[in-house]
Amino acid sequence: MATTGLVALGVIYSGAFDATATKPHESVVAWATHTAFKQSVKLRAASIRPPMGFTRAQIISGLADYDRNCSACHGAPGIGRGPFAAELNPTPPYLLEASRKWNTAQLYWIVSEGVKMTGMPAWGPSRSDDELWNIVAFLEAMPSITPAQYEALRETRDPMATPAASQIPGVMPSAGTRRFPLWLDLISTASLAVALVCALIILQDIVRRPQKMWIMNVVWPLTALFGGVLWLVGYYRWGRRAAKSGGDSAGPPFAVKVGIGASHCGAGCTLGDLIAEWLVFVIPTIALAFGWKTLFAEKTFAVWVLDYLVAFGVGIAFQYFTIKPMRDLSVLGGLWQAVKADAASISAWQVGMYGLMGALQFGVVKPLSGEIAPVNSTEFWFAMQLAMLAGFCTSYPVNWWLIRSGVKEAM
Ligand code: HEC
């Protein structure tokens, strides 16, 4: 470290670094500044919330602003860059690719803050928030605007009244096509798709052969959402109700019964989690009530508090519908027995689940892409699948003990 610092100081003071603009940056310098730029944008843009979409009017006012202030450096559909652009170092790029490289929030951040050590100015200080979003709207729409449309719109005083305006569709904010590496996108999507198919297979089978206990009709398809093929096989091997009743006096081996007990609890957590995560995604202010910005700087942790409560509630409900008919209890008696039977199991599940979810989000996803996976990404739910499997592992021994000691019924 110290040596690196000395070498760097040496380069700076000796004048060995060529600061003229006529030569391109040495590849190491170019790599270092560009990587620093990319990472800094990802990090800082993560907290910006883009609007739900952009209207044609926004795109067209963005176009006018862009035409006046940006096209000389960046060009536009059918229009080359100004004569001095080629002399800038680095050369300002054409921006047709920009909306594929950066997501909406990141584009906003770049336009607003500019890029240090390049010719790219910060436009935020001279513009309102709305004006900045208009430019972003145009950047996102630019790839689909033809040179003829661009020409027609920039030429007129009242662009909204020109026929070309009606051909410009509104745009959705881009999620950033490559927020995460492609391989991770593919693995996550595949894993979720397989799980969904497994859940559907179980569902269609269970409709025709309902379980003895109705709550298991819900439990089995839910378990496939995290357990995928393994739980599908488990269902056909041990869960499916025999065609002829009777002859099931022995049931599956004890180890399997424990697995089913743990999965039953996991199904409650899965449903609770789905509800809580999407609820906060749609209504983010809910997270404030659970300690976001007061107890936790990181929103994730506030959502986990809610997750835990909802998962607990759903888990206890599942257990209630199991234990009440089995033991022929009153409502209150059933609830109490359900809490006794499943509280430890749910808590053990959540310890494993949050443990792995945290490790994946902050230890793998964030270092990989500069931000944790948001709820509306496949990466988030893939990580959740793995986390649920970890939850299964931590709650399995607890279920073993609960069922062996008779606190919880074997299913
Ligand atoms: C004086 C020239 C100049 C002007 C004017 C200018 N830019 Fe830039 N811009 C640059 C340069 C140079 C870069 C490249 C920075 C780099 O290499 O990292 C850049 C980069 C960008 C990027 C990131 C591109 C990418 O693919 O990484 C965006 C987006 C952008 N500019 C948008 C705009 C918008 C919008 C305007 C007008 C409001 C504008 N620029 C005006 C010079 C300019």
Image (cartoon, rainbow, N blue to C red):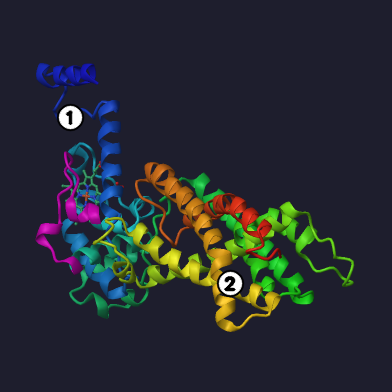
Where disc 2 sits, the SS reads helix
- The span picked out in magenta is 109-130
**Image x and y of residue 251, in percent:** 81, 61
Query: Quarter-wise, where is residue 411 in the image?
Result: bottom right
Q: Is residue 391 visible?
A: yes
Q: Nearer the viewer, residue 208 or 65?
A: 208
Give left or right: position of 199 versus 360: right
- Mark 1 closeness class: few <14, some 14–19, many ≥20 residues within 10 Å: few
Dot placed on the residue nearer the N-terminal end, 1 or 2: 1
Query: What is the three-letter code of the residue carrying label 2?
Result: Gln
Query: What is the three-letter code of the residue carrying label 1?
Result: Thr
* Residue 117 falls inside the magenta stretch: yes
Q: Nearer the viewer, residue 307 or 208?
A: 307
**Image x and y of residue 61, in percent:** 22, 70
Q: Which residue is mark 2?
A: 337
Where disc 1 sits, the SS reads loop
**Image x and y of residue 408, in percent:** 64, 64
Q: Nearer the viewer, residue 170 or 146?
A: 170
**Image x and y of residue 274, in percent:** 50, 67
Specify the label residue 22 is tagged with: 1
Give left or right: position of 101 versus 70: right
